[in-house]
Image (cartoon, rainbow, N blue to C red):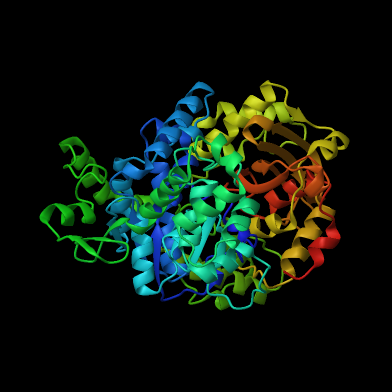
Amino acid sequence: MGINDLLSRLPGGSEYNYSFFELGWRGKTVHIDAAGALFECAAAFASDFISGNHTPALVVWARKLVYLRSICGWNMVVYMDGRTNPAKQFEDERRTQRRLEAVERNDLRGQIKNTPEYYAEAMEVCKFLNIDVRVAHDEADPQVSYVSIKGLCIPVTIDSDLLAYGVPKICIFKLFEKEVFRIIDLTRDDVEEGEYKLFDLYKAHGAITFQLYAGCLGCDFTAVRSGIKGIGYEKFIEAAAAVDGQLTAATLAASLWRSFPQILEKNSFDNLTGVEAHLQEVVDVYAQGKVYDSEANIRDINDKLISPASPQTKQHMSGTVNCRTGEPHPQPFREKLLSLQRNCNQLIATTAADVSNIEGIRLPASRESPVNCNVTELRNFIACRGGKVGGTKNELVKTVKANQFLEKQVSRNYVQRDVNKEGSLFHKSINSTSSSMAQILTDLHSNGNKFDTKTRGLIALAFRCHEQGLFEEEYANIARVSPELPPDLIYRSYAHVGMSLQQKSIADSLKRMFMANEVTCHALALLPEERRAIIFTKCIASMKADEKREKTADNQTKKDEYTQLIELLYEDTDRETSRHDLGVFVKVGRTYCTKCVAGQGDCRHKIGACHTSTPYLCLVQLGKDI
């Protein structure tokens, strides 16, 4: 998606950030191109989405919007894709072919496509949250570029095309839900000349630099995804730098023809005119993109009026009709949207379970504030949310207040499923030291109907790995095959409420757990074709990390036990750049933890399990300042 090999050639293109909150955009208007974010939400629940159940994806979408609105304080304007851009015909054909191939190899994620119905449902969620949402005339890329340039705002997108449309500063995410993103700022004045040669060309010639670069290296608008095969970054820079005067399709084509005629001929260009026409066609797409203004008039991206607003354009921009065709939605789907309007609040709530009987779900009504509670009441409140209950009363009070602040912002609690003594979270076989991995996975799988869709899918995947004999239980073997676990992934995945990323308490807590907890069973399964790993861990917690203070019948300390299932995604590495070819973990996916009451495993326990699987992170690194 976007322009090939562009971002790494620009300042900020290799610098990843991991927190939208830390951008400090509270109170600012933020334009969001929703296509990439919605695709990610759908891909997380690919099986449900493909079967027509969009609800799990919409739940993730809704909760992320609540976070951005209430916690980050963004004044969002969200844009959905509109009509199909004719200039994108070749890319649409390529994507259709990739989806067909994904069906053949049973790749569910590869079959995902944002549909008009999905966009309409996502818009209803925005409206329910009082977030401004609109449909673009064509794709959202030029629309978001247009409003960002006019409003001097920084857009949030997954698409590098916005730079070619003329936006000088963008927030481009790799993972929306996990907040992995880069900031590309073309207004920077702290970059030495020659450090980024493409950036130097941009400063000299403007956005047409990226438009011509897209024509050479490939983008969504080129007939071949690779553009002009054989013309890469170095050859583009050489040809563009040789242009005397203004950089245009004509002058660059002439320079390319002089320097690399054989390469152009191999790409079926018979003469200079053909090269110029190819480049000019791409430039025209970026320069003439159609957008709506605030009144639904159709303009080009340079604000030239193409046609005045009409009832049809107003309906289309508001999202009351099919975003692709402009036709009214069929009656059955209109009824479905009405039902969604009535039940949107259920997407924001994390559960419909009765939480009143869960100990610690709220502080005693007789207490006016956490300060007036005793230590046991504070610990119950924190443990109910999967938090760490060690520390002084003052520290516990701070953690409780942090939880209360977040829950006030989101207006919901965090419990995801009905927790009861008969439920699988508390099943005896899970909490028995004699239980093997096979027994536990079989038990979890047979109780799959007690879990939500996301957790059920993780358990099914782990059970399949067990049946196929993919789990390796010998740590010496695990250490030889496990991908690298970067320190930043540990910190980004350590999600305790009340723990500041600026405090060393994160590292201290992790180190205590790593050194004190007793791992009774640990196994790793690698799925190379899917670039994912499954970790199974069973631990007996030490008192330092324990959330219980109980005694056994013979008055010995009763140690807590917990089982972890974790899905990790990884990318390939090579010996030249990473000194090993084992791969590197890039994302913690689905998790399940029997120790945390909510069962999400969004806690320190999952990080301990991840750490056990990799030899590439030593405890010394965890002592550094973050």
Query: Residue at the spot x=65%, y=37% of the render?
Result: 532
Instruction: Give percent across and percent down for residue 270.
Output: 48, 37
Position of residue 315 relative to residue 199, above or below, is above
Residue 217: x and y in percent read 55, 47
Q: Residue furthest left?
A: 311
Q: Is residue 544 left or right of residue 294?
A: right
Residue visible at 21% across and 46% down? 338
Q: Is residue 245 visible?
A: yes
Q: Examine the image and state in which quarter residue 604 appears.
A: bottom right
* Residue depicted at 58% across the width and 36% down the height: 458
Name the outermost residue toward the right.
Answer: 476
State the image coordinates of residue 612 (x, y, percent, origin top left). Answer: 79, 46
Q: Closest to the observer: 578 or 47?
A: 578
- In this rendering, position of residue 279 left or right of residue 80: right
In the image, is residue 615 above or below residue 106? below
* Left or right position of 411 against 436: left
The reply to whether residue 17 is in sight is no
In the rendered image, the quadrant that contains the C terminus is bottom right
